[in-house]
Amino acid sequence: MKIDIDGLTEAELIDLNNRVVERLKLLNQMRAHAQMLEFRIGDRVSFQPEGRPLLVGMLTRYNKKTVTVITENGEHWNVAPGLLRRVNSSQSADNASANVIQLHRK
């Protein structure tokens, strides 16, 4: 569908622009929502902020365009769902076992 914008008045162009911007925002929110649904509250996830090492944490909340992740060192991050990766349970078990001390029975 083509729209001949040459024949539109300034008011019609402004209205068209506002409608296009709102539609693009809606599409962006729908895409973010679909990506959020790939994760559940309580999932262990990882992400890498620019200039920082890989961070691992737990997804704790869905926001409008982002999710909140609390990292292992207690930092709260709002992260776009497209930047998240699920942490495998085997990776999680390896990390957990590093913090477990084996006690020997007598």
Image (cartoon, grey):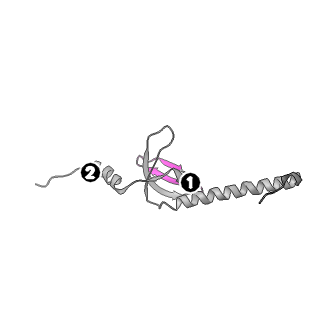
- Do we see residue 99 in this rendering? no
Give coordinates of residue 65: x percent, y percent.
59, 55
Q: Identify the residue at horizontal 23%, vertical 50% (top origin).
A: 101
**Alpha carbon of mark 2 to alpha carbon of mark 1: how far?**
33 Å
- Mark sitting earlier along the chain (2/1): 1
Give coordinates of residue 90: x percent, y percent.
33, 55
Q: Which residue reaches farthest top? A: 51
Residue sitting nearer the eye, 74 or 84: 84
Q: Secondary structure at mark 1?
A: loop
Q: Which residue is mark 2?
A: 100
Q: Which residue is mark 1?
A: 66
Looking at the rendered structure, the kind of residue marked 1 is Thr
Label 1 Cα crowd, 10 Å radius (few <14 / some 14-19 / many 20+): many
Q: Which residue reaches farthest front? A: 1
Image quarter in which the N terminus is found: bottom right
Q: Is residue 47 left or right of 105 when viewed as pictured? A: right
Looking at the rendered structure, the kind of residue marked 2 is Val
Q: Secondary structure at mark 2?
A: loop
Label 2 Cα crowd, 10 Å radius (few <14 / some 14-19 / many 20+): few
Q: Is residue 2 left or right of 55 when viewed as pictured? A: right
Q: Which residues are magenta?
A: 64-78
Image quarter in which the C terminus is found: bottom left
Examine the rendered structure and indicate whether residue 48 appears above or below residue 24. above
